[in-house]
Image (tube, rainbow, N blue to C red):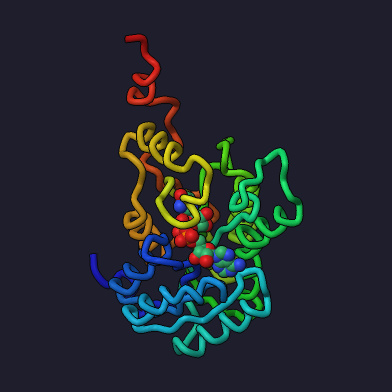
Amino acid sequence: MNNLLQGKRGIIFGALDENSIAWKVALKAHEQGARFTLTNAPVALRMGEINKLAQHCNTTVIGADATSVEDLEKLVQQSVEQLGGKLDFVLHSVGMSPNVRKGKTYTDINYEWFQKTIDISALSLHKTLQVCTKHDALNEWGSVVALTYIAAQRAFPGYGDMADAKAMLESIVRSFGYYYGNLKKVRVNAVSQSPTMTTAGSGIKGFDSFFGFADKMSPLGNAPAENCADYCITLFSDLTRYVTMQTLYHDGGFSNIGVSEAVMNEFGKE
Ligand SMILES: NC(=O)c1ccc[n+]([C@@H]2O[C@H](COP(=O)([O-])OP(=O)(O)OC[C@H]3O[C@@H](n4cnc5c(N)ncnc54)[C@H](O)[C@@H]3O)[C@@H](O)[C@H]2O)c1
């Protein structure tokens, strides 16, 4: 399938380095004919990696802290101006927990950091959507995709307060999806991705075991980031126009497994 996103304009949040899910989405969106701006937090831009991606995709990078409404307003307005019209898609691939990063366990949480986790990883989606509605920045049948994780539904030790943030993110997907659908037929979905070796992923304590366990549980194995990017492209395309307000699992089957033989065999008597 070629040119699935021909003529479409968008904003891609969260490409930090070439392992980032957003990085892979940007490459595929470019391949499929989309034009878009790239954005990340000013601190992430200082690493400079994203400029390589921008060059490859023939685009620009607009710095924005996703927790700042002012930054988001500038980002959305500048993107519409630079791309020459309203937007058709937004990828929200943003997440960070100071508690997880600094090794605070869930039962000994720092509440100021907890609020930051929620602001960065969940409210930033609401803020982005609200700015887009206020500026009428998205075309009819536009598509917004946010990345999430199954710790929103099930307990996963080590995922800490990110689990609460993801639960809120998925709730915002449903609630805003309702309003934006009515308003402009814009769809809003979350893609719940397998554990993936990225900066955000490997910040989780015991991530390697986490990754290996999910891989053994899933009949298809863990879903790679490239395939997650393919899935996001289908959600930005016109082939999925009536999909909205969903948490969509892109996880090799993990979410519907009780236990796999591969995992049971680890516990069998010799
Ligand atoms: N890696 C995994 O195992 C996994 C699994 C499921 C879902 N996800 C989700 O996928 C998304 C992307 O993560 P990733 O795995 O590609 O890792 P990543 O570290 O490459 O991406 C996270 C991005 O969030 C950005 N970010 C952090 N604070 C920000 C702020 N204040 N403003 C703007 N941007 C900010 C970072 O700079 C980074 O680019 C996240 O929502 C993550 O929770 C990841």
| x and y percentages locating residue 64 in the rendered image | 58, 76
Q: Is residue 261 above or below residue 25?
A: above
Please state which of residues 40 and 168 is positioned toward the viewer in this rendering: 40
Q: Is residue 68 above or below residue 101?
A: below
Q: Residue at x 57, y 85 (%)?
A: 77
Query: Is residue 238 visible to us here?
Result: no
Residue furthest right as drawn: 111
Q: Residue at x 57, y 40 (%)?
A: 158
| x and y percentages locating residue 265 in the rendered image | 34, 19
Location of residue 10 (image quadrant): bottom left
Q: Is residue 211 above or below residue 24?
A: above
| x and y percentages locating residue 121 in the rendered image | 60, 58
Q: Residue at x 39, y 77 (%)?
A: 8
Q: Residue at x 45, y 26 (%)?
A: 258
Residue furthest front as drawn: 102
Please state which of residues 126 and 166 is positioned toward the viewer in this rendering: 166
Q: Quadrant of the C terminus?
A: top left
| x and y percentages locating residue 57 in the rendered image | 34, 79
